[in-house]
Amino acid sequence: MVTVAVAGGGGGIGSDIVQAILKSNKHEVIVLSRSSQPLLTKQGVDVKIVDYGSVEQLEVTLRVISCIAAYGTNSTAAELSLLEAAKKAHVARFVPSEWNSPCHDVVDLYSGKGTVWKAVQSSGLEYTRFINGLWMNVWGPGCIRDEEEALGAYKNRPPFAIDLKAGTAIIPGDPSQKMVLTKTQDVGLFVAAALDLPNWEPESRIAGDTLTFTEVIQLVKRICGKDLRITHMSVENLQELLKGDIDSGERFYYQLLLAVALGRMGFEPTLNDLCPDIKPVSTAEYIKRHWTCD
Ligand SMILES: NC(=O)c1ccc[n+]([C@@H]2O[C@H](COP(=O)([O-])OP(=O)(O)OC[C@H]3O[C@@H](n4cnc5c(N)ncnc54)[C@H](OP(=O)(O)O)[C@@H]3O)[C@@H](O)[C@H]2O)c1
C-alpha cells in the first residue's frame, strides 16, 4: 500500500482519480484542497486544507498527483509550489497536471503546463505525465441518459466540437486524422493501476479509443440515426480566426481545435498494454449508453 496525495482531488479529473483509487482498495489517498470537501470527508478521505502560497506549510506525502486546473499564472504558481514541497519531502513520485496531449505551444492557456513540465523534468524526482487525448465526456452535455456518468470530470461546460443535442459538428483539419478519446473515469482507473507499477516512464499515454472525425460522425448516424450538420475548419481558417479580435474563451476553443487539426490528439498508447485488465469504454459504447434510450 502507498499513500498518495491528490491536489485538487475534489474537482474534475482529480475526483475521478480519487474515486478510482478508493475503489481499488489498495492505497491510501489524501486530498489537498484550498477548502473543506465535505463529500470526500464523508467518504472517509483525509482532506488537508493547503495554502499553495507557502511551500513550508505544504506537507506532501510519498506520491503526489496534481489535478489542479492548469490555466493561468495562479495555478502554475500553485503547481510549482507543490513541486518544491515534493522535492523538500523527497517524494517518490510526482505527476503534473497535464491530462490532455502535449500542445503547450498551441494553446496559450496551457503555457503554464510547459513551465511546470520543464521544472518537473529537472526536479530529480521520478515522474510521469498522463497523456489521455480528448476527454470523451466532452460529448456528454445535454445527453438523454445517465448524465452524471456521461459528464464525469467534465461538469458545467459546453460540448466540444460535436454538439449531439444541437446536431452539429465542427471538423478541425483533416477529417481522416486519428485522435484519442478517453473517458475521465477510465483515466482514473489507469492512474490507480499505475500506482502499482514498479517504475514510471516519463510519459504514460492512455487511449480509451482512437477514431477519426469521419468515424465519429458515422457512429452517430449508425447509433442515433442522426445526420450531423458539419462545418469544416482548416488549419488556415483557424489560424486566421486566431489573428482576429476574439475573447479569451473563443481563443481557448479555437486553439484547442487547432491542436486537434495539427494532429496533437493522435498518439500511440503506452499504459494500456501495462494495464491489460482495464477495458476502457469505446466511443460507440459511450454514444449508445448516453444518447439512445435502449
Ligand atoms: N483532455 C481534456 O479534454 C481535458 C478537458 C478539461 C480539462 N483537462 C485538463 O485536466 C486538468 C484538470 O482540469 P479540471 O477540469 O479537472 O479542473 P477543475 O475541476 O476546474 O479544477 C480542479 C481543482 O483545481 C484546484 N484549483 C483551481 N484553481 C486553482 C489555483 N489557482 N490554485 C490551486 N488549485 C486550484 C481546485 O481545487 P481546490 O479548490 O479543492 O483547491 C479545483 O477543484 C487540467 O490540466 C486541464 O487542462 C483536460
Image (cartoon, helix red, strand yellow):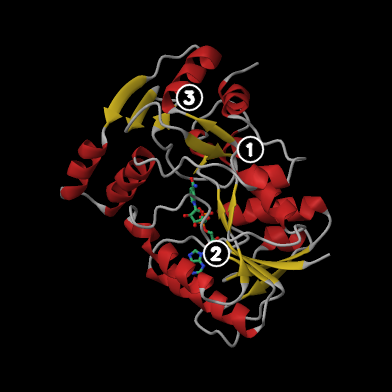
Label 1 neighbourhood size at 10 Å, few (<14), some (14-19), many (20+)? some
Of label 1 and label 3, which has the lower sequence position? 1
Q: CA distance from mark 2 to mark 1?
A: 25 Å
Circle 3 residue = 216
> Which residue sits at x=80%, y=51%?
24
Above or below, comparing residue 164 to residue 23 in the picture: above
> Which residue sits at x=39%, y=58%?
110
Q: Residue furthest bottom?
A: 56
Circle 1 residue = 149
For the residue pair 173 and 60, the one nearer the viewer reads as 173
Q: CA distance from mark 1 to mark 3?
A: 20 Å
Above or below, comparing residue 118 to residue 231 in the picture: below
Q: Do the residues under discs 2 and 1 have CB atoms within 8 angstroms?
A: no
Mark 3, ligand 1, within 8 Å: the answer is: no
Above or below, comparing residue 13 to residue 178 in the picture: below
Q: Amino acid at mark 3?
A: Val
Q: Position of residue 259 (x, y in %)?
A: 36, 45
Secondary structure under tag 3 reads helix
Q: Position of residue 216 (x, y in %)?
A: 48, 24
Whether residue 165 sits left or right of residue 239 in the image: it is: right
